[in-house]
Image: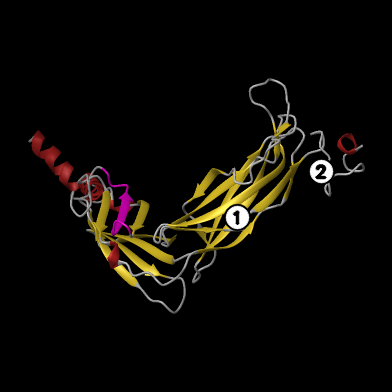
């Protein structure tokens, strides 16, 4: 009698409705915990004409389980101009085949022949270099010189797509330069007054026998930013740091050389050298044409 009363109250009250809603919510949480949060963390493309290899990789946030992912594709479309047309879609894998090394880790890969990508007949070249030719060191604060190099390359749009079991597609797009080249910056400092690092005091000294060919590699750029859509112009930007005068920063003439390395043809394109005058009031040198007795009396009297 007492038990039947409890059962009657249980199934005739709103308690039953609350139980059903609670159970439904739990089922929903179990069914779609990760699919709603599928993300493309990184897309990588490498084109090697010498080894005849095209390497594509898409890294997702589904490292623990890939049960919600059906397919991963990468579409490669040429966007440099309206003359040459190319668009191709590639399927990537996460099963230790087709170039994938580790199965079921949420990283999808494809290693195939580079001949599957048809490139336009575009010769890479350095179009322009933007940088100051005179740089004044601050007395107490470090500073940096802005440099940007515009390169003519091969503009492609790479679109990564993930389709899941709920028919939801996650996409990510970016522009890449597939001319298989990079820029190297070399600097000749033989014409500068540079501090001797082996001494404690600031003793800037000059090389009595400067070598015009004494260039050292300073920096390399491998990835530029597309200047504008439907163009093949990419901008490579960086900053060169300089110490202050009080920190004994070097002054004088530095010669900058920019080299575009074309890995497809194994050739180099060398831009005209740029001379940078580095100066500062208080370095003991009166830089002709820049400093005078009015602007820096202590150096030019």
Q: Which residue is drawn at 27% across and 63% down?
A: 90
- As drawn, which residue projects farthest toward the left? 1
Is residue 57 in the magenta section?
yes
Task: Tell me the mark number nearer the camera, choosing from 1 and 2.
Answer: 2
- As drawn, which residue projects farthest toward the bottom? 83
Locate residue 87, reporting x and y percent: 34, 71
Q: What stretch is highlighted in magenta?
A: 50-63
Locate residue 245, reporting x and y percent: 75, 33
Q: Is residue 229 left or right of residue 252?
A: left
The first of marks 1 and 2 along the sequence is 1
Determine whether the residue tagged by mark 1 lies in a helix, strand or loop.
strand
Quarter-of-image position of residue 130: bottom right
Q: In this view, does 222 lie to the left or right of 20?
A: right
Locate residue 77, reporting x and y percent: 37, 69
226 or 247, which lies in front?
Answer: 247
> How far, Cα to Cα, is label 1 from label 2?
26 Å
Quarter-of-image position of residue 207: top right
Q: Which residue corresponds to mark 2? A: 287
Determine whether the residue tagged by mark 2 lies in a helix, strand or loop.
loop
């Amino acid at each position: 009698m007492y038990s039947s009363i409890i059962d009657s109250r249980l199934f005739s009250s709103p308690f039953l409705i609350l139980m059903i809603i609670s159970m439904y919510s739990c089922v929903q949480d179990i069914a779609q915990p990760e699919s709603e949060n599928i993300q493309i963390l990184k897309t990588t493309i490498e084109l090697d004409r010498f080894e005849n290899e095209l390497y594509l990789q898409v890294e997702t946030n589904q490292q623990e389980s890939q049960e919600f992912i059906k397919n991963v594709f990468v579409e490669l479309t040429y966007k440099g101009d309206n003359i040459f047309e190319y668009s191709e879609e590639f399927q990537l894998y996460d099963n230790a085949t087709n170039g994938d090394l580790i199965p079921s880790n949420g990283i999808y890969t494809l290693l195939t022949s580079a001949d599957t990508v048809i490139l336009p007949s575009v010769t890479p070249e350095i179009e322009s270099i933007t940088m100051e030719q005179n740089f004044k060191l601050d007395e107490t604060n470090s500073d940096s010189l802005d440099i940007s190099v515009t390169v003519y390359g091969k503009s492609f749009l790479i679109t990564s797509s993930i389709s899941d079991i709920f028919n939801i597609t996650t996409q990510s797009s970016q522009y890449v330069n597939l001319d298989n080249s990079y820029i190297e910056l070399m600097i000749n400092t033989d014409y500068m007054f540079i501090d001797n690092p082996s001494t404690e005091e600031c003793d800037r000294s000059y090389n009595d026998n400067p070598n015009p060919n004494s260039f050292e590699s300073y920096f390399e750029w491998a990835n530029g930013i597309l200047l504008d859509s439907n163009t093949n112009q990419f901008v490579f930007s960086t900053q060169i740091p300089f110490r202050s005068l009080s920190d004994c920063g070097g002054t004088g003439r530095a010669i900058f050389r920019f080299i575009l390395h074309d890995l497809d043809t194994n050739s180099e394109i060398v831009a005209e050298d740029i001379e940078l005058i580095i100066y500062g009031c208080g370095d003991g040198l009166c830089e002709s044409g820049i400093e005078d007795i009015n602007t820096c009396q202590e150096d030019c009297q």
